[in-house]
Image: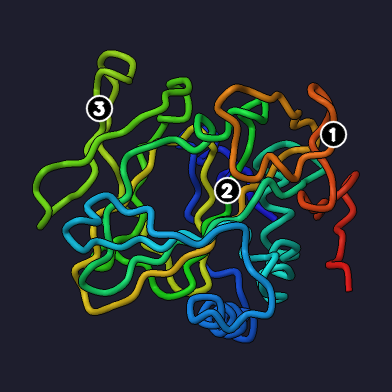
Amino acid sequence: MLTEEQMASFRKNGYLNYGPVLTPSELHDLQESLRKVEEGRSEKSPESKRNISWGQDKGFVVTQIVNIWEAEPAFYRHLFNDRIVPMAAQLMGSDTVRVWHDQVQVKPPRIGGPTTWHQDHPYWPVIQPADLVSAWVAIEDAIIDNGCMWMVPASHTWGPHRGGTIGTDEKTWGPTPDLSLLPEGVDVTPRPQEVPAGGVVFHHCLTWHGAPINLSEKNRPAIAVHYMPGWTRYEPTATGHMVEHHITVKPGEVLQGDHFPTVMENGEMFSPKE
């Protein structure tokens, strides 16, 4: 469980770089399972698998896999991690926790593309309110050299803004924030979040974050599970969302269902279904 100091740091900054959480066996299972999905050897398929990188015409690649838990049992079990889930519950202030969706991003060696500065929740318009917390776990070491995540302290207090920009210098820092989207006078200095393989950094769904290109010889795969507090509602919009077709509740109702696994309810941890 998190200390009051760690909780205070998250409330202030909008993120918490906690450190190692996975056992060697859990980490190995995720690494092997990711390889199966990348190589098309999984018996089932994820929601989507695509290159979302800016600069694809220049050869940049960021492989995004959404709901990999649907394809591989190791990633399904990961949703219920009994070290991660209680901390996410603490950070959200909820004793009930569900999964919105997961998202793997792989930045391959030498051609790993940048991730634009953004907040998560503006891209999830069909769920409200903006109280979600993501648990971003490094599947291999994520360091400055291979494009680790960078986050802007206190940016979760600036309100929701959809958009981001990419810098023009492809050899240095990729993303740059669009100051016109932000409150006047705020400090937009990002902080690197290096995470060892099997470690986790939590962030609020309104925290500004991004990542530069990966020109190193090291791969940079990571899995983010986007956790919802128990009061998250379905609020359909014109823009929609990729996983909305799985939603079975009515507008205004609490979002739950088989495709949005409950991992904790009333303080009790759930186990994966066999």
Residue 103, percent across and down?
Answer: 55, 56
Gap between marks 2 and 3 measured at Cα: 23 Å
Q: Quadrant of the C terminus?
A: bottom right
The amino acid pointed to by label 2 is Ser
Residue position marked by numbered label 3 in the rendering: 178
Residue position marked by numbered label 2 in the rendering: 134
Closer to the chain start, of discs 1 and 3, is 3
> Front-most of 88 and 168?
168
Could you tell me which residue is drawn at 55 percent across and 27 percent down? 239
Closer to the chain start, of discs 2 and 1, is 2
Residue 93, percent across and down?
Answer: 73, 36
Numbered marks: total: 3
From the viewer's perspective, is 112 left or right of 141? left
Which mark is in front, 2 or 3? 3
- Secondary element type, mark 3: loop
Closer to the chain start, of discs 2 and 3, is 2
Residue position marked by numbered label 1 in the rendering: 249
The amino acid pointed to by label 1 is Val
